[in-house]
Image: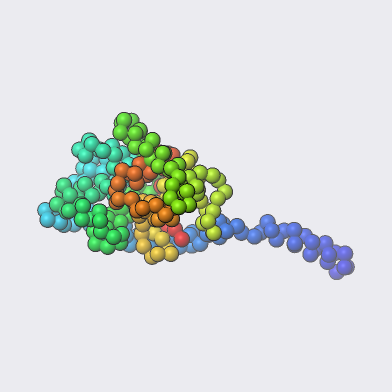
Amino acid sequence: MKPSLIACALLSAAMAAPAQQKSAADGIAEYRKMLEDGNPAELYEAKGEGLWKQPRGPKNASLEQCDLGKGPGKVKGAFVELPRYFADTQRVQDLESRLLTCMQTLQGFNVDEIATTPFGKGEQSNIEALVAYVSAESRGMKMNLPQGHAEEKKTFELGKRAFFYRAGPYDFSCASCHSEEGKRIRMQDLPDLTKNPGDGVGYAAWPAYRVSSGQLWGMQRRLNDCFRQQRFPYPGYASDVTIALSAYMGVNAKGAESIAPALKR
């Protein structure tokens, strides 16, 4: 080959190389795709289904009559409509707080004791398995949180205010990381949660199995870790502010396809 042709070939290869390089986001997406068929969250789903049907607690009862918003015992489609208002408790509840209510009323558990149990321990571990099961029953469905009740609208507004509230030693808010497109921390993309970030992103991807910790995290645990990173005091488990933040993100995710429980780094 003539030197001029060799030079042209090398130049063409050099120009093509950047186009062929994967972005960090592409690499992470490919990694998740490879693990998708073996997502360890499936083990939590199976455990959660067993716990849903198993008579437990001081009343030796199952959760099969628990009303998650679709009627007693109906699980399919419930997750994509939570948080929502419940007349029996007269408050807006997310999945974890609603499960606490059912565990108290149907099974006789001490919910105050559960709420102060560390994540991943005792009944907290069981709740995360139940969350995996319930969310999996709505996989592929569209997020559609109701906003018809006055309390639901009030909770959304509270969540919006909490999302943009800046405080702490670094003057952070949720919006510091999640209110603009194109942001990331190290290799982790940060979706804009002030609007619908798309299918299977943000709220529509939690709960999720976290490869880095080898555990399944529900939204309550995810938010708790966000408060930690902001150097805020830890919020109370199933507190009004965590439910409100979930409502804000969930309403913004309207129409996004749920892939929960997903797989995270």
212 in relation to 55, above or below: below
Is residue 256 visible in this depiction of the protein? no
Q: Which quadrant of the figure has residue 247?
A: top left
Is residue 159 visible in this depiction of the protein? yes
127 in relation to 69, above or below: below
**14 lies left or right of 187:** right
Instruction: Give the colour scheme shown.
Output: rainbow
**167 lies left or right of 28:** left
* Residue located 48% across and 40% down the image: 195
Count of marks placed on residues? 0
**123 lies left or right of 36:** left
* Residue located 27% across and 47% down the image: 97
Please state the horizontal and vertical placement of residue 81, each as a whole percent of the image. 34, 40
* Residue located 88% across and 64% down the image: 4
Between residue 9 and residue 223, name the one nearer to us.
Answer: 223
* Residue located 54% across and 53% down the image: 184
Please state the horizontal and vertical placement of residue 235, each as a whole percent of the image. 33, 50
Q: Which residue extends farthest left?
A: 59
Please state the horizontal and vertical placement of residue 229, each as a whole percent of the image. 43, 55
Q: Which residue extends farthest front?
A: 169
Between residue 202 and residue 55, name the one nearer to us.
Answer: 202
Please state the horizontal and vertical placement of residue 93, each as a whole percent of the image. 29, 42
The N terminus: image quadrant = bottom right
